[in-house]
Image (cartoon, rainbow, N blue to C red):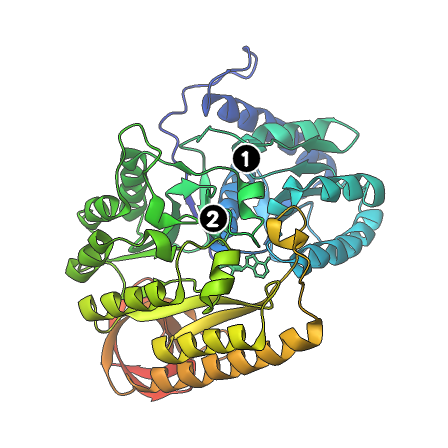
Amino acid sequence: METVKSIQADTKNDININTEVPVTEPQRQFYYMDLAKQLVSERTKACGHPLTFHVETFGCQMNARDSEKLRGILETIGYEQVDTEDADFVIYNTCTVRENANNKVYGRLGTLGSYKKKHPQMMIALCGCMMQEEHVVERLKKDFRFVNLVFGTHNIFKFAELVVRALTEKQMVVDIWEGTTEIVEDLPVERKYSFKSGVNIMFGCNNFCSYCIVPYVRGRERSREPKDIIREIERLVADGVVEIMLLGQNVNSYGKTLEHPVTFAQLLREVEQIEGLERIRFMTSHPKDLSDELIEVMAQSKKICKHMHLPLQSGSSRILKAMNRHYDKEQYLTLVDKLRAAIPDIAITTDIIVGFPGETKEDALETLDVVRRVRYDSAFTFIYSKRSGTPAAEMENQVPEQEIKENFDMILKEVQHIATEKAHLIEGQVQPVLVEQINEHDASLVTGRLSNNSVVHFPGDSSLIGKIVDVRLAQCKGFYYIGEQV
Ligand code: 5AD
Ligand code: SF4
């Protein structure tokens, strides 16, 4: 696996680990990284081979970015990355947005437990959204006692300190915070790709959609200062990055809680000015906060990709109200019209939940109607999952599985049919493609993405990785293209 180190350590002063533990961050974490380095080096000597680590990420882009931060620390303290789970240090960065995400983790932990029986020195850590749920931690303490370290979403910046504890204490180390207002800058990050990167612009969510557990496990909305974001992107660009993805649960409400409020559109205007940066993406946009100013900035921009992920969730105004989404069917459709009027070739993608409590056939048909009218370029369609602690879990009119399945299949079929039709519309065109990797199945091809996020495979070699090249979309294969460089 290709990885790129970008240690942003200009705040790291010379740290002497014999002195007192610093109280301010990030200095405190650099102190613990030095301490961890010593511990890892002792263990390495004792076992006679380099210690390895593996981070497994479940869930969204936000988690993927958090995993890069975990990798940054582990590389810094002397572990080497491997692709398999028979490593000396394995971390699961978990998701809990749907029930099956939790089940997956319990299942995989069982397997990990049997590895550990054979290698008692192995370290196992769990973090991420699922760990913010009390019942999960209780179950881990009861059924998975071999886990060394459990921490949550709010204290991930303390990972170095927690690793030192886990390496030196005999019992399971559990550190879960209920929330935080802290944002710690300048810790090491180990990027998966040399040429593209996620950039957190905010953490948490204030929306409390009634089905969603995220506000409970990720806490209240906190935005990073624009100057910190710009500085991070400038450093990334200096390090070879050409595409960034600005990350937040609801990027359209970025900056509202800052001491000097800034809009997301204003932030984008500043990011656009960064020389050397070629492409800007962002995720996720809540329809209720999508401003005319943002549409205008997107329409004028040369760098913002022609793609908007705009979660619909449901096409029924009645269900949207019960979901606490703060928009109705007509408002959503008007927004899509505005986007298309300003940016005619924009790709629009979405998330849809089928089977929310009280959803009838008529409601599902309303969703189908929106799917047909918007004609999404692609859509993630989910079956409603009851998350305990959310208001929707308490609703009495939960929908029987069989009914959900029927509506789900109906909507999914239409989504796929339309997505294929839409993909064919640009067949034959020449478009810029950012080459991401060698094709996973055929080494004579490379794989890249269009501005609208579609995937293209075309003949090429590794020298193209990270470059933006013009490609003719010779053949549309439904969800992807086979192309040729021009
Ligand atoms: N059940 C099913 N899907 C959900 N999502 C969020 N919560 C749930 C749930 N309880 C979906 C939403 C969101 C996406 C990230 O996950 O569609 O946009
Ligand atoms: Fe969940 Fe709604 Fe926040 Fe998205 S906006 S994370 S769906 S509560």
Residue 183 location in percent, x, y? 44, 31
Residue holding disc 1: 154
In the image, residue 433 sits, relative to residue 297, either above or below, namely below
**In contact (CB < 8 Å): disc 2 and disc 1:** no
The quarter of the displayed image where residue 307 is located:
bottom left
Say which of 279 and 392 sits in front. 392
Residue at 27% x, 63% y is 305
Amino acid under disc 1: His
Crowdedness near tag 2: few (<14), some (14–19) or many (≥20) residues, C-alpha within 10 Å: many
Residue 95 in view in this figure: no
Residue at 40% x, 32% y is 186
Amino acid under disc 2: Arg
Say which of 379 and 78 sits in front. 379
Residue 152 location in percent, x, y? 61, 38
Residue holding disc 2: 65
Quarter of the image that includes the C terminus? bottom left
Give the distance between the C-alpha atoms of the residues marked 2 and 1, in whole angstroms: 14 Å
Left or right, residue 234 beside residue 42: left
Residue 343 location in percent, x, y? 21, 68
Left or right, residue 482 beside residue 22: left
Looking at the image, tell me whether mark 2 or mark 1 is earlier in sequence order: 2
Crowdedness near tag 1: few (<14), some (14–19) or many (≥20) residues, C-alpha within 10 Å: many
Which of the numbered marks, if any, corresponds to residue 224?
none
* In this view, the mark in front (2 or 1): 1
Left or right, residue 91 beside residue 248: right
Residue 184 location in percent, x, y? 44, 30
Q: Find the residue positioned furthest to the top.
A: 20
Provide the secondary structure element on which disc 1 rests: loop
Residue at 34% x, 43% y is 254
Residue at 18% x, 57% y is 296
Provide the secondary structure element on which disc 2 rests: helix
In the image, residue 4 sits, relative to residue 75, either above or below, namely below
